Image (cartoon, rainbow, N blue to C red):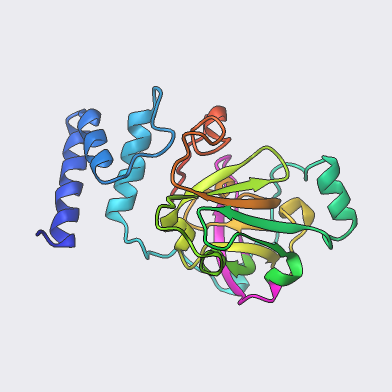
Amino acid sequence: MSSPLSRRKLITTGLATAAGVSGLGVAGILAERYGLIPPDHGGIFGAGETLTYAAQRILMSRHSLAREFNRSEISKVIPVSGPPPTTDPYQRDLAGKFANWRLTVDGLVSRPTSLSLEELKRLPMRSNITHQACEEGWSFIAEWAGVPLSYVLNLVGVDPRAKFVVLYPYDSLWDSIDMLDAWHPQTLLAYGLNGNELPSPHGAPLRLRVPRQLGYKSIKYLSRITLTDSLKNVGDGQGSAEPASGYSWFAGI
């Protein structure tokens, strides 16, 4: 049996060769063999999406960390991408300071649960000062505080069949991440920003914070998390609302 290192070298060499010889079809075959096909692999850019996702997962350690900064490096201005949801459920919960809000966690788990904001805040808290890069060109550094998503996953008991975590917000911009990013120690369910409560424009009461991907993957205004073994029957099957607007499901940096 080959070692993990030789196996990685073999796959990496194969992907690099496939890309260099314009053989993206070969790259796709290798990626499929090792379960590295992204949900948005169809269409004109599908081969490129597959190559990007597979190469990143193979070349980078699953435990590699996004750079963390000093508190003195926190940005003075933090841009906001879009206004909060105007729907009645969100505005009602916002007016009630999210006292009745709950995060539902279900799907392929042993113990489906529903957690209030106060219950989440009683769980072990972690924080990180990381860079958020926006696909539109702006970026900032901020300190995020919350409970590691991995802790909540351990709390509910993840079924071994689970491959993706689907995140549903109050608005229509649902998304998903694979289990590698879900278990990553820097991935947070964030309820704090720069030492204060998370403001509404930045995703209150709770948002995902996944520092190893572009900003649009850090879904705001969370209301439900579902674990699944496939994304084919979720939404349009592309793993996110973003591919319909031209963005990739995987936005690793």
Q: Is residue 129 left or right of residue 76?
A: left
73 w.r.t. 20: above or below: below
2 to the left or right of 151 = left
Q: Residue at x 68, y 46 (%)?
A: 169
Say above or below: 31 vs 215. Answer: above
Farthest residue in the front direction? Answer: 110
**Image-quadrant location for residue 75:** bottom right
Give the residue at x 69% y 58%: 103
From which residue to which does the magenta span run? 121-142
In this view of the protein, which residue sits in the foreground, 117 or 79? 117
122 drawn magenta: yes
Count of numbered badges drawn on the protein: 0
Residue 56 coordinates in the image, percent (x, y): 33, 49
- Residue 135 placement: quadrant: top right
* Percent x, y of residue 76: 69, 62
The vertical placement of 231 against 246, above or below, is below
User: What residue is at 44 percent from the left and 41 percent from the top?
Assistant: 230
Which is more toward the observer, 218 or 113?
113
Residue at position x 45%, y 58% in the image: 159
Is 138 covered by the magenta stretch?
yes
On the image, the x and y values in percent for residue 224 come to 65, 51
Q: Residue furthest left?
A: 1
The residue closer to the viewer here, 35 or 233, is 233
94 or 251, which lies in front? 94
Residue 31 locus on image (x, y percent): 27, 41
* In the displayed structure image, the side of residue 1 where residue 239 appears, left or right: right
Quarter holding the N terminus is: bottom left
